[in-house]
Image: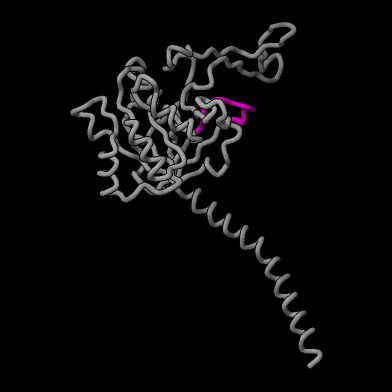
Amino acid sequence: MALVRPRIAVLALAAACMALAIAPVRAASDLERAYRVITAKKFVDLTHAFGPDTPVWSGFGEAKFSPAADPKTHEPYTIPKDGFRATYYEMVGQYGTHVDPPAHFAENGITMDQIPLKQMILRLVVLDNTPYLAKDPNHAFAVADLKNWEREHGRVPKGAFAALRTDMYKDWDSDPERFKRTPFPAWAFETIRYLYEQRGVTATGHESMDTDITDKMDSETYLLQHGHFQIEVMANLDKVPTTGALIVVTWPKVKNGLGFPARAFAILP
């Protein structure tokens, strides 16, 4: 009997070691399976390309792009002469499809470099405002509209990214002046508050340059001052299913950054 307990202990230790050895293999296998699944899916770009002549709020002004030059000679770098070339960008952070971190409107809010990585890949729901635009071209998506949407598609899941489809993005290249129009189809403030307080979404986004059409930017002020981020000037939301997709959003890690052009894309189910 004296030898039984040591044998049991040895077997238990061996089993524990095997489990530890297998765990990384299982983790790697899980990631490999996830990678195979994701790469087989369709991706949709939710981001506009931008340049010096694309729409921007008049209070910021358009970007300026110029060849990067040697600071001593002021001669632009070229491939024939230097073996490389580069561009000097002069623009406000809130340009093109961009991220607004809480610090954009909140003195003590986190900056874009502090937004958690896990908030950069989320479940995506697309709330469609277009059915209301025939009667009201500047319709603000209301709580009643959201509840109608939920009756058809189910409750907005906690932690999701909620994007508002208005099809405004189609004017970005074809009619930039129309894209900059005001008023425009947007969120209703009560809907933004409802999504964050009652549904617990992580972030929201939309196609216009502003969240809503209130004089004091109530929706943007509310969500940023409550610790959330938003993506503005989104594209191609009409090419994404209402539910079931994932959104990936990313941006440069600017220290203490208050906003910057972002790259957002959807992975379709």
Q: Nearer the viewer, residue 47 or 156?
A: 156
**Residue occupying the point 41% across, 33% down:** 205
4 on left or right of 92: right
In the rendered view, tell whether residue 70 sits above or below residue 257.
above
Q: Quadrant of residue 147?
A: top left
Q: Quadrant of residue 64?
A: top right
Residue 240 placement (x, y as % from top left)? 37, 41
Residue 78 placement (x, y as % from top left)? 66, 15
In the rendered view, tell whether residue 163 sits above or below residue 11.
above
Residue 141 placement (x, y as % from top left)? 29, 33
**Residue occupying the point 43% across, 34% down:** 46
Q: Quadrant of the N terminus?
A: bottom right
Q: Quadrant of residue 117?
A: top right
Q: Nearer the viewer, residue 87 or 99?
A: 99
14 on left or right of 144: right
Q: Which residues are magenta?
A: 252-263
Residue 56 placement (x, y as % from top left)? 44, 17
Q: Is residue 147 magenta?
A: no
Q: Nearer the viewer, residue 150 or 39?
A: 150
